[in-house]
Image (cartoon, rainbow, N blue to C red):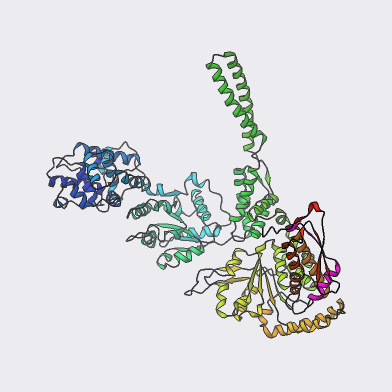
Amino acid sequence: MSSLFERFTAHSTHILQRAEAIATHAGAAHVEPTHLLLALALERGSLGAEILAKVRVQTDALRAALHIPDAATRAPVDAPTTRRTTRRRAPAHIPLDENTRRCLEKAALVAATHGHRYIGSEHVLSGLLAIHDSAILRVLQELRIEPDTIAPHLANVLTSTSKFPEFTAATTPAESAVSTEQTQAAPPKTPALDFFAKDLTAPTVATGIDPVIGREAEIERVIQILCRRTKNNPILVGDPGVGKTAIVEGLARKILERDVPDILAGKRILALDLALVVSGTIYRGEFESRLKQILDEVRQDTNLILFIDEIHTIMGAGAASGSLDAANILKPALARGEIRCIGATTYDEFKKHVENDPALERRFQLVQVSEPSAESTTAILRGLKPYYEQFHRVGITEEAIAAAVRFAERYLPDRKFPDKAIDLIDEAAARLRVLTKNDPLLRKANALTATLEQIDHQKRAAVAEERYADAARFQEEHATALRELTGIHAKLRHRKTTATGHIRGPEVAAVVAQILKMPVEDILLEEHERFRTLDVQLRDRIVGQAHAVTAIAHALQRAKSGLAAPNRPLASFLLLGPTGVGKTETAKALAQLLFQREDALIRLDMSEFSEGFTVSKLVGAPAGYVGYREGSKLTDTIRKKPASIVLFDEIEKAHPDVWNLLLQILEDGRLTDATGRESRFTNAVIVLTSNVGSDAFTRASIGFHAGTTPSDALASQYTDIRQDALRELRNRFRPELLNRIDETIVYLPLRREDLATITEKHLHVFAERLQREHQMTLDTPPETIAWIAERAFDPAQGARAVRRLLHTHVENPIASGILEERFHRGDHLVLAPTPDGQTLDVRVHAAPKSTRHPARSTAHA
């Protein structure tokens, strides 16, 4: 029993001493379990007392139930100490009764079961419950406390709390115990770190780390900081996925390979799992005790370097009322250089948590980790290629690597290199591996395994029934099937060392298509092909503005060929012209044709930015104002979708401060928001629209009403119209803004033939919708299109007049006919002007009676 007491913590020893004092004052001949229970409840700061308090055990009520006077519990007892003692001795004045001895033995057994090298108050409480002492059960019943309510709290503490002492020094085995147990294995020097951290420099860990490529400068900077005398704590800051953790892993690999200065030779980098340190610390003091022991172990061994990933989580970690968080516990050790610590976090979290705490920030040396370029990412993928080929057993071609970088840059703009490109390669290889799950050889092996089990079962049944001839036959069948299965397994083992296939560009494109839910054909269509035919595609969408379409296509082709400035937007356009001529439609068409995404158009209505304070909507509210750090309409969106069309609609309505922002975007291709984060516009197309110079357009359109102006006459007037519009534009906007725009394009008023083409397009779309929803066909003869185009000709309205006429003369009559059941499914409708030419008439060419059904709108059924 004496060796047992040497493993007691200070709290446990104090509980025994207090129990002896209580027994003495109560006049008892032995220390009983009830005395131990009361002493445990009175031991403030111990886990056992915390658990009893949690189940509402009140010390006064417990004392009264045990009929023990108050004076007995106030007897002078030595306070618990956390200092190391040369020996712990059991109380010797009053002996322990049999149940108390059993309780302490049970406590030791519980500690051993959970791998604890000490016996604490929680183990003593567990022992008290385990012996089922009748006096304790009676007292708990008087207090209306079920033992079952204590058990869950005990289980939580024993399984989730630290496998380390409540106080570090208090649990160190006595020197005498160490001397008498020389044959036992010595305890580890860093038990807390062994449990809460992973050694990145351990050979088994470091050899499994992927190589770090293109980060030599960052690793060298980290090494320099670690070699400092004080403040030798680097913190890696960068966007998610740029390789911050990989830099630390690369340093660990360099240390293992002895490719570091002498001062770092033999160092160990330990990645601390802060979540594991915090988990289960439900009682005050547990977290501080764990972290204190971790820091003590790092202080004692100068070869240890602590690595805390997501280091911003130390702010507030483990904090409770009246206690310190991890950051405040770490600060003194970091400042004095007692420990070396490497941190890693993102820009957002660094600004939010670390930068706002100057006392913590000054203890770290900043190492910025920027996103690698596409070329660097390609080199990284080439270096990682053998590891992914070996894991997935597929070949990775250069075509796949180039496609992964290209597609990741284009279609995953909200993520960072190299992470997004690596993910595409990884998933493409996994997808190819999954597609081989229906391998005939593997299916045959599974079938043979099932057959062997069946034959074995039949053979045992035959032997049991003494059908030995059948058993012999089953034995031969079993041997034949086993030989065949062995041969198949040999083939499968051979295939594990060879590639089962190769991933190329289409396989990577298929993964992107799955992520974005878009056709893989759109992704595989080469960009140069898309830009080469851009002129033709735009002419099909934008009617009557051939000169504008040509200028836009040439500017974009120039940018994509690499001849434009790389640090500016792909292209910037200022589109002038009256309303309804296709300026906004041009931006929509560019978004669809260039980026194949419906959300590729970022539209900003400048009428919302007519006041100076509204600039904060674009770049975020400044510090101290409402909405600070809540994000911004422009910078946050372009950061997530850098390959976009940014449309500043009706720019003349914007406040001049908005124009100032445009200067920076158009010249340098970047914009800094209120929090200091930079957004890049180098993959975006900037489109500005304006109605400035509308008077010039109106005057020029007067001659078109008679319908006698031919195309060459219109072209001859274009120069005069353009000069008038540009003159008014220069009077309205500052030259530094206009000079930064690649192309200023003047849109002409639409002619009658243009309106006829637009009308035909709208009617075609409407007819498709009618066929899809109601299975009706619509016939629109040329005179119908001419009738609509003639009445839609209004320079003040442009093409929008066509839409209004279609609502009035086409869609409304057909909708009424459907609802009144005058039109039926399968009907053939003919839209033609009335004889007097005042309106349009919808005539029905009925389908056969067998196919006639009342038309009902599926959208509104």
Asked if residue 284 is positioned above or below residue 191 in the image, the reply reads below
Residue 388 in the figure: left or right of residue 59: right
The image shows residue 616 at horizontal and vertical percentages of 55, 75
* Residue 700: in magenta span: no
Asked if residue 771 is positioned above or below residue 695 in the image, the reply reads above
Residue 184 in the figure: left or right of residue 96: right
The residue depicted at 64 percent of the width and 26 percent of the height is 484
* Residue 793: in magenta span: yes
The image shows residue 547 at horizontal and vertical percentages of 80, 73
Residue 428 in the figure: left or right of residue 232: right
Q: Is residue 593 visible?
A: yes
Q: Is residue 75 visible?
A: no
| Magenta stretch in the rendered image | 773-795
* Most foreground residue, 256 or 540: 540
The image shows residue 396 at horizontal and vertical percentages of 66, 47
The image shows residue 36 at horizontal and vertical percentages of 21, 45
Asked if residue 736 is positioned above or below residue 812 in the image, the reply reads below
Q: Quadrant of the C terminus?
A: bottom right
Q: How many marks?
A: 0
Q: Quadrant of the N terminus?
A: top left
Residue 599 in the figure: left or right of residue 101: right
